[in-house]
Image (cartoon, rainbow, N blue to C red):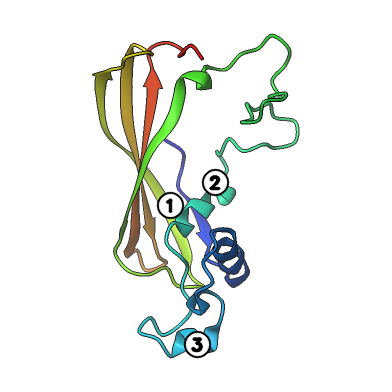
Amino acid sequence: MPDDFSFPVESGHVMLFARAVGDDNPVYRDPEHAASTEVQGPIAPPTFVQASYHWDPNASYPRPGRPWRGSAAGPTGLPPGETSSSGRGLHAEQRYIYHRSLKVGETLTVRRRPGETWQKQGRRGGSLTFSEEISDFYNHAGELVVTATSVAVITGRAVDP
């Protein structure tokens, strides 16, 4: 599991995230409007904690000088002849438990821990191994704000197209 890291819930990032997911609720972008609501100030939309990935120092997103396996049909960035086992894995599920709304202006610390692991038999890819990674998001006071559970599945062998 990666080390703990922190990320800011910034107003500009929240606005851009809301636009990207097509949610034009003014509670995400208009402080005056948000102050008049039950949340009493701007908040982040559901699933915003996924944007913490951009602050994760161990994330596998493309970085200069580091090979990666892209998701496009073109070059992967890996050296010629080098392969990746990621062709057998996929993101299977994502769940969130919100203990309260994410407030714009706060900084959250992410702590990851393993969850359950289980196996099933697949029809085309042989055995399927499912595993959970649980990310707990805490505010500066140490209060749990969001719990996110990611489920990955790895097939026993690559699936034929």
Give the percent coordinates (x, y) of residue 40.
Answer: 41, 85
Residue drawn at x 24%, y 25% is 118
Residue drawn at x 63%, y 69% is 12
Does 18 appear above or below 65? below
Q: Which residue is mark 1?
A: 110
- Say what amino acid the circle numbered 1 marks: Val
The crowding category of the residue bearing disc 1, from other C-alpha atoms within 10 Å (few below 14, some 14 to 19, many at least 20), is: many
**Residue 56, which numbered label?**
2
| Mark 3 and mark 2: Cα distance apart in space | 32 Å
The crowding category of the residue bearing disc 3, from other C-alpha atoms within 10 Å (few below 14, some 14 to 19, many at least 20), is: some
Q: Earlier in the sequence, mark 1 or mark 3?
A: 3
Label count reads 3
Does 79 sit left or right of 33 as displayed?
right
Secondary structure beneath disc 1? Answer: strand
**Looking at the image, which is closer to me, 89 or 7?**
89
Q: Earlier in the sequence, mark 3 or mark 2?
A: 3
Does 64 sit left or right of 112 as displayed?
right
Q: Say if mark 1 contacts mark 2, CB within 8 Å.
A: yes
Give the percent coordinates (x, y) of residue 2.
Answer: 46, 38
Does 69 appear above or below 114? above
| Mark 1 and mark 2: Cα distance apart in space | 9 Å
Q: Say if mark 3 contacts mark 2, CB within 8 Å.
A: no
Which image quadrant is residue 156 in? Answer: top left
Does 108 sit left or right of 134 as displayed?
right
Give the percent coordinates (x, y) of residue 114.
Answer: 32, 36
- Say which of marks 1 and 3 sits in front: 3
Residue drawn at x 56%, y 66% is 14
Which image quadrant is residue 90 in? Answer: top left
Q: Earlier in the sequence, mark 1 or mark 2?
A: 2
**Residue 33, which numbered label?**
3
Secondary structure beneath disc 3? Answer: helix
In the picture, the quarter occupied by the N terminus is top left
